[in-house]
Structure formats: C-alpha cells, structure tokens
Amino acid sequence: MIIKSVILSGGSGTRLWPASRESYPKQLLPLTGERSLLQETGLRLKDFGAREVDPRPLVVTNEEYRFIIAEQLRQIGVRAPQIVLEPFGRNTAPALTLAALAAQEEGDPILLVMPADHVITDIAAFQQSIADGSAFAADGALVTFGIVPDRPETGYGYIRSGEALAEGRLGRALVEFVEKPDRDTAQRYVDSGEYFWNSGIFMMKASVWLRAIRHFNPDMANACEAAYAGRKPDADFIRLEQGAFERCPSDSIDYAVMERLADAPELGTGVVVPMAAGWSDVGAWDALWAVSDKDAAGNAGRGQVLFEDCRNTLVHSGSRLVAAVGCDDMVVVETPDAVMVAHKDHTQDVKKVVARLKAEGRSLTKSHRKVYRPWGWYDSIDAGERFQVKRIVVNPGAKLSLQMHHHRAEHWVVVKGTAEVTCGERTFLLGENESTYIPLGHTHRLANPGKVPLEIIEVQSGSYLGEDDIVRFEDTYGRSS
C-alpha cells in the first residue's frame, strides 16, 4: 500500500514570538537549519524504503498561508502538492477528515498525519517507527506514535499503552490518552514504562478514518463531506464550500476518535508505536534550545551571534549581530522590529506578552516587517509622517495586481533586474538605476518579465499609507480588494 503524507499546517505558535507571527508562524521558519519546519516535515519520508510513498503531500492549511506553503514546497522539489484550504479553523479531526476525502479520490492510501511544526532529529529512527506503524495501519488499525519519555515532562499529554501486539515489530495496545500531569504523576508515568508522550502523529488508511469519524461524529463527517463536495474549481488549491464547513464541529483527532476506540472495536484496533527519534513540538524557546546544536558551554546560536562567558543560553538573531555577555540560562530573540529577552524558566510566559500586544492593538503580533506575497516579498525599511520606504522583490515571471490607491503616490527605483511598469494607459520597461512616478489615483502594475529577481525601492507619500488602501482591478492570484 502507498503512504501519503498529510501535513497539518494551521497553528500560530505564539510562544515563539517574536520570530513566529500570526501571518508567518513557526512552521514556516527555519528554526533548526536552512529549511523551515514545514519543509523538514515534507522531506521526512525521503528515501523511505519500507513502502511506496506518494511524492505529493497533502497539506491542510488556511487561506493566508497558501502561497508561501506552495512556494516552500516547490523549493524542496515537491511538484503539484494537494493543498486544502480551510475557511475556518476547526482543529485536527476535521482537517484529517478533509485530507482523507481528498486522498480517496485516488484510492485508499495509508495516511501519515504530521503537524508541520515539529522537530525530529533522528530520521532513521523515525522511519523505522513509521515502517512498524504502517504494517498495523495496512491491517486496518488506527495508529498513534508515542514518544519514549526521557524526563517527567508536565507540558505534554501522555498515552498509556498495554500489551505488545505483534512479534518482530513495535506496537502496543492503546489504552487511554491522559491530560498533562503534575510533576509527581509524570514521574510515576516515566517509571512505569507504560506511558509515552503524545506526539500528535497518526497513521491509518483513509477509509478507516472516514468509517470511524462517521460513526463517532456524524455531524463532523457530514459537514466535511458537504464542504468537500461543494469545493470550487482551482488549479492550485482545494477550496471548500464555506457555508457547509462553518457548520462543522471543532475537535481533535484524539478526542473525536482515538480515545473512543475501545467503545467500538469493530472500527479498528488502537495501536501505540513507540518512537525515540529526537522529537520536539518546539512549543517554546526553551524547547528549541533543547534540540539545537550547542557549544561546550551549552550555548545555542542562530544568525550573527557572539557569546562571551555565557552558559546554557539561546540567542536567535534575525537581522544583525547580537552579543551576549555573562548570560546563564537565558533566551534572546532578535528580529528587525522586536527583541525578546527571557529566562529559560519563563519562556512559556511569552504568550502573555503576545496577549498584551494584541490588547493594545499592536501589529507586531500579526506580521513581520518583511511580508511575503505570492509574487515575492517586501520589507518596510523606514517610515515617518506621510512617507514610507519599502524594498520590494518580485520573483521572475511574477506580477503584482493591477491596482490604484486613493491616498498615496509612489516613486519606484529599480536597483536590480528589469521592471515592466503599467501606469494608466502606458506600459514600459525600466532597467537598473531607472525610476518612475505613480501619481495618486492612477491605475498601475509592477511585473518582472526577466529571469532574475526584480528588486526596487519604493517611496510612498501621502495622507494614509496602510495596506488596505488598495483597489484591485485584476489579480493573477485571485485576491480581492
């Protein structure tokens, strides 16, 4: 049987602020290497030898992340991925139901369900666990993967396992899921050898999941089936019928099905496959420090970082040199528009900072200074009263929408590549060191007809410079004004 990866990519990762933002969450960030967590997840079954793997992962996400997810998958060589767009967040059980419906269009594969924002450092051990799990899944079981605990962790849910199920392959009976314990209870769990951390990774045939969700939660199944049946034609994405999906109940895979399998054994056996593969859900900055490469003093750095007399400290630099002096058990995170400093014991409290910023209406929780668009990206490098300066990069062959602004004019200076400019009735080319002026109220468009990225400096001037001062007349990417 074929294995198909299902990647769940809807979370916001507020505990990893300021690197993670609502419009660019942690799964899209390269936190542990050159590739993002999403890309690492997409490559997790590369060279997997136990079974045939569908090269096209099925990603469930939302409208806002669709283009950057498609681009990041393209960068790692994934062609024509199936990307399902949820119009509303409804937790993991509806997401898996939609994925199973899409997967059944081409047969009945084994689905390997993975969150997009986890870290796994031992790929060989991961693939061995997946091989064991796939054998149970092929026989009709619903499989979850339990992380072998190496400490009494109070921040994770646990899975209690029972007897071994098969000779020669790892796998135990699934007994129950347990909520996050206190310290003493967590220690008893670890000492017993019966409990594993809940990884949030699952495996089952598409038909097995659909049969189970129809039995345990018919309202969810019906809403997902109606939303999928009413999907809109789109060459790049699977767009659901919003009205039907809005009626869908919200629930997790654990609660909706896995915890209830004992009540209906005819639907499939619940199986726990132990996994010891350097797993982390990277739920906060201290968790990232734990899985990062460190120097002899226990320091982990990313970007331009200099340590002097520091121990067990994480420094994450996004745009400039950060020098840490005399820091013990600290976390320092720098981005172009924010800096966060915390003791490692208090990294869970970063969410409180995010809550305060949201309450104050600050945009720092929503987006970075550098903003990605389907055509490329822009960086707001300076701003003041009645002006803003942006660095804009347009990918080869891409173009912005045909648009107009009510409150601002724009000057464009080409610093790299060739620009095709539409302004009013005119369309013309600009080369490096050439510029043009877009008057307020004029219809205009910027495009890159060349083979290299186009880079321009844009100076905006006017009474209002917000991103919502855009009237779109035509857009390649289906965005409205």
Image (spheres, rainbow, N blue to C red):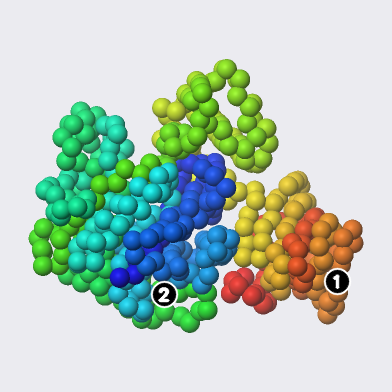
163 on left or right of 68: left
Question: Which of 77/6 is in front?
Answer: 77
On the image, the x and y values in percent for residue 300 come to: 53, 31
Q: Nearer the viewer, mark 2 or mark 1?
A: 1
User: Are circles 2 and 1 on residues that touch, CB within 8 Å?
Assistant: no
Give the amino acid at mark 2: Leu
- Give coordinates of residue 282: x percent, y percent: 42, 42
Q: Nearer the viewer, residue 366 or 59?
A: 59
Crowd band around label 2 with a 10 angstrom C-alpha radius: few (<14), some (14–19), many (20+):
many
CA distance for labels 2 and 1? 40 Å
Q: Residue at x 73, y 57 (%)?
A: 392
**Front-most of residues 32 and 318:** 32
Mark 1 surroundings: few (<14), some (14-19) or many (≥20) residues within 10 A: some
At horizontal 28% and vertical 37% (from top left) the residue drawn is: 149
36 to the left or right of 442: left
Find residue 471 and name its label: none
Q: Helix, strand or loop at disc 1?
A: strand
Where residue 440 appears, as percent x and y from the top left, is: 80, 66
Please say if 161 is above or below 207: above
Task: Please report the residue visible at 30 percent of the width from the left and 74 percent of the height from the top.
Answer: 108
Q: Is residue 262 visible?
A: yes
Decide if residue 363 is in sight here.
Answer: no
Residue underneath mark 1: 429
Query: Left of 350 or right of it: where is 154?
Result: left
Look at label 1 and name its amino acid: Leu
Going from N to C along the chain, the mark reached first, 2 or 1, is 2
Q: Residue at x 83, y 80 (%)?
A: 425
Q: Is residue 78 above or below residue 330?
A: below
Q: State the residue position of label 2.
A: 240
Report x, y in % for residue 171.
20, 52
Q: Secondary structure at mark 2?
A: loop
